[in-house]
Image: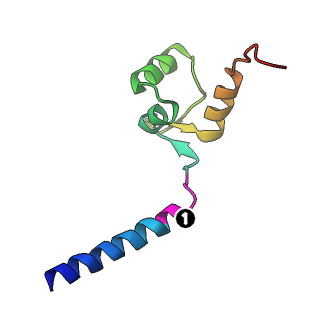
Amino acid sequence: MLDQQIEDLADIVAARVQSALRKPAVVPEYLTPAEVSIFLNMPAKTLEHWRAKGEGPRFSHVGRHVRYHVDDLRAWMRERRVETGGEQ
């Protein structure tokens, strides 16, 4: 009986994982500094220093909270793209 319950539960979990994998990943329009840190793979402290110095990607204040628009982050990264001297 217990083995059947475990097997049934495993089937339910597997079905939910399969369903979740079929759905496209949703990236919110605005990200917190912690989320941007993950998105750009850099410390949140670096973002904080850049904000204080007026550098880095554009951001918005929502009350006392900082938010970054995903389009601004992507544009900022594109501006820093370096072309290499590979085959032309």
Say which element carries label 1.
Answer: helix
At horizontal 21% and vertical 81% (from top left) the residue drawn is 5
Dividing the picture into quadrants, the one containing residue 58 is: top right
Instruction: Please identify the residue farthest to the bottom as the structure is shown.
Output: 1
> Is residue 22 visible to the viewer in this orientation of the structure?
yes
Classify residue 59 as left or right of residue 49: right
State the image coordinates of residue 60 (x, y, percent, origin top left): 56, 34
Q: Nearer the viewer, residue 80 or 66?
A: 80
Image location (x, y in percent) of residue 77: 64, 27
Residue 7 horizontal/vertical position (percent): 26, 77
Q: Position of residue 74 (x, y in %)?
A: 65, 34
- Specify few, some or many for label 1: CA neighbours under 10 Å numbering under 14, 14-19, or 20 or more: few
Q: Is residue 66 visible?
A: no
Horizontal side of residue 65 vs 4, given as left or right:
right
Query: Count the marks: how many?
Result: 1
**For the residue marked with disc 1, what is the amino acid?**
Arg
Q: Is residue 18 above or below residue 12?
A: above
Q: Which residue is mark 1?
A: 22
Q: Which residues are magenta?
A: 20-26
Instruction: Tell whether position 71 is magenta.
Output: no
Image quadrant holding the N terminus, namely: bottom left
